[in-house]
Image (cartoon, helix red, strand yellow):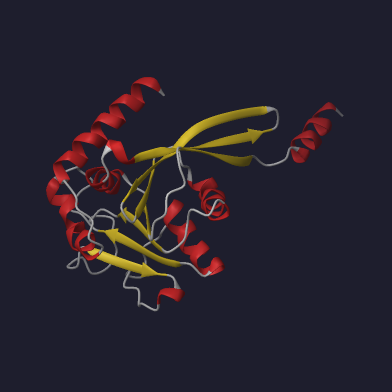
Amino acid sequence: MEKGAKKDKKEKTPPPSYSFKYLLKSRPSYSTVILTASPLTSSLGLGAFPESSKTGVITCTKTSGNVRTTLSIATVYHLASFLYISTNEKLRPEFSIDFVESLISEGLLHGSVLVLDSICESEYVGDKRSRIKNIYSKVSGHTSNLDAGNSLKGVVAATLIAGEVHNLNVRCVIGVPESYELSTENLQIFQQVSEEISLNVNWLNGIHRYEQEKFKHQIYS
């Protein structure tokens, strides 16, 4: 009887829910939103957006039964016509869709949305001669060239889904570096993309800042 009661209680436990809080100094105007989804692309972002352009952070509260956990999952920067949202490893795939929907409801995803991610050469399926692969939402009117057999996950997949559902102009750029090492050689495969949108990137400074942030995060998290 007791075993059956425990099973019944487990079945009635609701799934975790997620809520997001935006701790922003201001709501600036911009025409392009950039999201980064990997250490390599976060280094790129930090090489383009100085600390002085930081406008706030986004936190996520996970509620599971009576337990609530709050984590900082993204940092927001604003510079010229760009809003940059730098996600970190605590933005889990299981709540990426909730996160992107929250960005939309907050009015932060509009204009052109550019998501940057990377797949290591040894893991990429298909033609590796081109180091940059593009996946577009239908409203953009462009043709995607990601080879079949490669899977997208987390905030990349969630943003593309949101692009289709909400008719957003989304471009996901997947870099195919030789390795995941934070090096200028691996970062500079994104140089053409940064030039296309007139984003000035200091590659070495971006790597340095990312390593500093990662080290600080490991100590104090």
Query: On the image, which quarter does residue 146 sit in?
Result: bottom left
Asked if 49 appears above or below 70 in the picture, the reply is below
Residue drawn at the location 70% of the way across and 32% of the way down: 65
Residue that appears at 18% across and 63% down: 192
Q: Is residue 125 left or right of residue 183?
A: right
Q: Is residue 37 above or below residue 113?
A: above
| x and y, in percent, of residue 82 in the image | 34, 54
Q: Where residue 17 sits: x, y (%)?
A: 64, 41
In this view, the residue farthest toward the left is 185
Residue 130 position (above or below residue 178): below
Q: Nearer the viewer, residue 41 or 94?
A: 41
Q: Quadrant of the C terminus?
A: top left
Q: Toward the viewer: 82 or 147?
A: 82
Residue 8 location, x and y as percent?
81, 37
85 sits left or right of 21 in the view: left
Residue 36 showing in the rendered view: no
Q: Is residue 24 visible?
A: yes
